[in-house]
Image (tube, grey):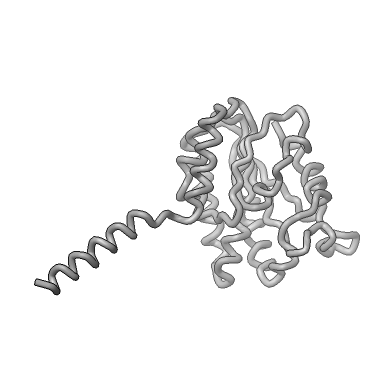
Amino acid sequence: MKKIFAAFLLLTFVLIFSQNKKPMFWQDIQNFKKLNQEAAPPKNAILLIGSSSFTKWQDVSEYFPGKTIINRGFGGSRLTDLNYFSEDLLNPYQPKQIIIYCGENDFADDANLKTDVVVDRYKTFYKKIRSKFPNIQVDYISIKYSPSREHLWKQMKEANNKIAKFMEKEKNADFIDITSIMNDNNGNVRKDLFVEDMLHMTPEGYQLWTKVMKPYMK
């Protein structure tokens, strides 16, 4: 009887633990929901979705005066996370444009990850966007070459090239390449555009992104 009771307690503990365990970035999504409850998201805005390069761009609206921008970047996110939380990232909004920056962390999580896997993850998310918003403008910002992730640049370049070709064939879609503007005159990545971790950008980095992005902004 004692063994049966012990087994019952163990099963109960496992069930409770599994129910309480939340998926990665669950809290970030709850924070977005809270923001939406506090103030209804504006219609016909430009919706930013992606990882920490957007998350840390807290003053993005100041870079694009006159534009209504909703920033829904959450740091560390991968394209797998965008797909997992796609309903929460898309359903509450009625944007006129969606701009995506994501994919860098996919490679960082697995250095052996094949390029086509990341590209397919992006295509999956893109199709989810199109199922809800068939005609709005959708743009993808190229994966930046962070100095701290130089060992991944080859895969990132391949992914950028393949996503660029995919976007060229799509209607109301563009690939926004921020690569060259972040290089010096010799074609090397400017390390001074990054903060100490050599991963996240300085305000000057965002200013350069702004120059490239402005022509694409609705």
Q: Residue at x 59, y 64 (%)?
A: 107
Q: Residue furthest front?
A: 2
Q: Is residue 112 above or below residue 119?
A: below
Residue sitting nearer the eye, 23 or 141: 23
The quarter of the image holding the N terminus is: bottom left
Q: Residue at x 18, y 69 (%)?
A: 7
Residue sitting nearer the eye, 133 or 116: 133
Q: Is residue 169 above or below residue 9?
A: above
Q: Residue at x 59, y 42 (%)?
A: 72
Q: Position of residue 216 (x, y in %)?
A: 72, 37
Residue sitting nearer the eye, 148 or 180: 148
Residue sitting nearer the eye, 218 or 18: 18
Q: Residue furthest right?
A: 185
* Residue 166 visible in the displayed image: no
Q: Position of residue 188 (x, y in %)?
A: 83, 64
Q: Is residue 21 left or right of residue 144?
A: left
- Which image quadrant is residue 16 in? bottom left
The quarter of the image holding the C terminus is: top right
Q: Residue at x 33, y 59 (%)?
A: 18
**Number of marks present in the image shown:** 0
* Residue 82 visible in the displayed image: yes
Q: Is residue 212 left or right of residue 141?
A: right
Q: Is residue 50 above or below residue 1?
A: above
Q: Is residue 75 left or right of residue 150?
A: left
Q: Position of residue 189 (x, y in %)?
A: 81, 62
- Which image quadrant is residue 217 in? top right
Q: Position of residue 71 (x, y in %)?
A: 63, 40
